[in-house]
Amino acid sequence: MAEQEHNRGKERTQYLEDVLSKLRLDEPSGLLTRVSLRGHSVQNVRKRLPIIDSLSQQGWDPETVLNAKKGDTLHNVTGETFAVTRRVGDTVFIVNDMGHEGQISCSPKELKAKKYEYQTSDPRKIQVFDMAYNDDSVDTVEFIDGLVSSIPTQCLDVFQEIQIQKEAQTGGGKTRVEASLFSNSSVIVIYVDPDIYNLEESKKTLFHEIGHAVVRYLRGSTNPGERWKKAMADDATPISEYASKTKYPNKGDNGEIEDSAESFMIYVSADGASDSNTSRLREMASNRFRILDEVFQVLAQRQVESIITTLRRQIFGGTSIFDKAN
Ligand SMILES: [Zn+2]
């Protein structure tokens, strides 16, 4: 019976990301405006990587590792399990069930980086730290230009910098790590394979991470809350395989954190899904996209307000758009 249910579910499952991947998106629909660049400067710098980002990048749950003591069990995102044998200062010594020993360093790491500073057509600047390619090639500059110019202007206040880091490579292959979920900084981290430039994939990752940053900016937490959960239930369309599989129970999450970021990614990729070419996406996720329409209005409104009052960005108290009653 359970198997039958499962199979029936499988036949029916069509993710919103599958619909997106079949669309031709060369005509912008005009709902979102993108950053227009007025040139950039590049500097060689060293960038201190926060411990939390550094541990996440290695596939660890930072909280567990930072509190680890002898006898604890640690799980890596690769699926491997380790026992903590001892802890000396910032170093956690571990062993797996094959007897292989290793160690995890919990001290901040400094990495060489190229710092790009973009001047946009409004007074804002965008900082990008490239720790992955870290060269002066035309390909790298074009890649970073392409990423930055794909950002909706409405989102410029929700983050302070973008870091491009080497993706965590493990025995089992590549892993998806979302360092920004575990730290409270407004830094967007995207991971790349430094041997290739995959602009389309990297844009999706960027939009996804900006989605988390937007929720945090408006709500003070990456969990989008009850209104979003109701929209998910009412739409009844799964967004992507990743969103369906990824939950953070220790953050009180039943899937809405990744669902909101993946929805945001699809919404931005489809330029707000406001034309006939992208209407299928909006039909399938109408309740979520209606919230995102409002989110973009609120973001734009805040920018106008901040220009008028020249106030620095701040997290506003009171009721966020995610908590509004339907
Ligand atoms: Zn995510």
Image (tube, grey):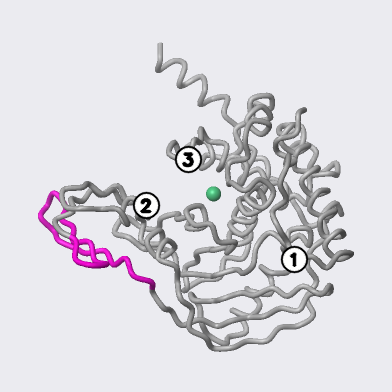
* Up/down of 297 relative to 114, above or below: above
Residues in magenta?
87-108
Mark 2 element type: helix
**Type of amino acid under label 3:** Lys
The answer to whether the residue bearing label 2 lies less than 8 angstroms from the nearest atom of ligand 1 is no
Q: On the image, which quarter does residue 273 sit in?
A: top right
Q: Earlier in the sequence, mark 1 or mark 2?
A: 2
Q: Residues within 10 Å of mark 3 (few under 14, many from 20)?
A: few
**Which image quarter holds the N terminus?**
top left
Residue underneath mark 2? 63
**Which residue sits at x=87%, y=60%?**
304
Residue underneath mark 3? 251
* Up/down of 307 relative to 20, above or below: below
**Type of amino acid under label 1:** Arg
Residue underneath mark 1? 312
Q: On the image, which quarter does residue 123 sit in?
A: bottom right
